[in-house]
Image (spheres, grey):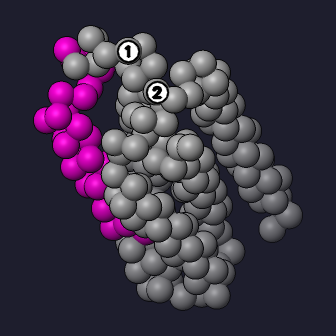
Amino acid sequence: MNSRTPDKAGVKLGMWLFLYTEIMLFGGLFILYAVYYSKYTSVFIKAGKSLDITIGALNTVILLVSSFTVASAITAVQKKAPRSAASLVGISMVFGVLFLANKYFEWGHKFKAGIYPGSPDLSDAEAGKSLFFGLYYLITGLHGIHIIIGLILLSISLYLITTKRIHATRFAVLENSGLYWHLVDLIWIFIFPLFYLIL
């Protein structure tokens, strides 16, 4: 029993180190956003008002609820309730897909309006507007990729739960998947006000 403890601790430490690099990545992008915001404040505010706050708020609620269900799934495993854990992970995955669907429709609306990287509308617009939407697509797109990775991790966890490889005494994979999902949620908590609630 004790011989497994260092491995579990090592896996968890490795995950925290990985999450730290992800925080550094998005932290750098947020700093870049702050620099350009300070230079083109009025243009950024005007561009931000063209985004749909309702969709942004809905996606925020979706991720917050999904984080709760992931945390509940870990608790269910610890309480030896694998069926409940599997259901909760499945619900989290459904919320993740809903998030991506909302983002797809939001991006699609912008593309139809001619607002996308390299579009004539943005090429002819003032520099601040093209920078705002360039960062918008870069940051939200990168976040979307992380959502997809999180869904893959959750699907692996779901498979391991259903095959009884994740159980009350062995749930490091689910725990680390949960940590990753919480990070994705946390990053969105910063993205939402930066682009949708910009003042």
Q: Residue furthest right?
A: 2
The answer to whether residue 199 shows anywhere in this view is yes
Left or right relative to 56: residue 194: right
Q: Nearer the viewer, residue 153 or 93?
A: 93
Which residue does the image show at 46% across and 27% down from the upper left? 43
- Residue corresponding to mark 1: 126
Give the label on residue 43, or none. Answer: 2
Q: What stretch is highlighted in magenta?
A: 92-120
Within the image, what quadrant is residue 32 found in? top right
Q: Distance between the residues labelled 2 and 1?
A: 8 Å
The location of residue 20, given as percent across then percent down, is: 71, 38
Query: How far across and down, in percent of the image, does residue 3 sit?
Result: 82, 58
Q: Residue 78, percent across and down?
A: 66, 81
SS for tag 2?
helix
Q: In this view, does 65 lie to the left or right of 104?
A: right
Q: Which sits earlier in the primary sequence, circle 2 or circle 1?
A: 2
- Judging depth in this view, the residue of 142 and 82 nearest the camera is 142
- Name which residue lies at 38% across and 72% down: 90
Residue at (46%, 48%) from the top-left corner? 196
Check residue 185 for magenta coloring: no
Which amino acid does the dot numbered 1 rest on? Glu
Label 1, residues with CA under 10 Å away: few <14, some 14-19, many ≥20: few
User: Please, is residue 88 above or below residue 193 in the view?
Assistant: below
- Main secondary structure along the magenta-highlighted residues: helix
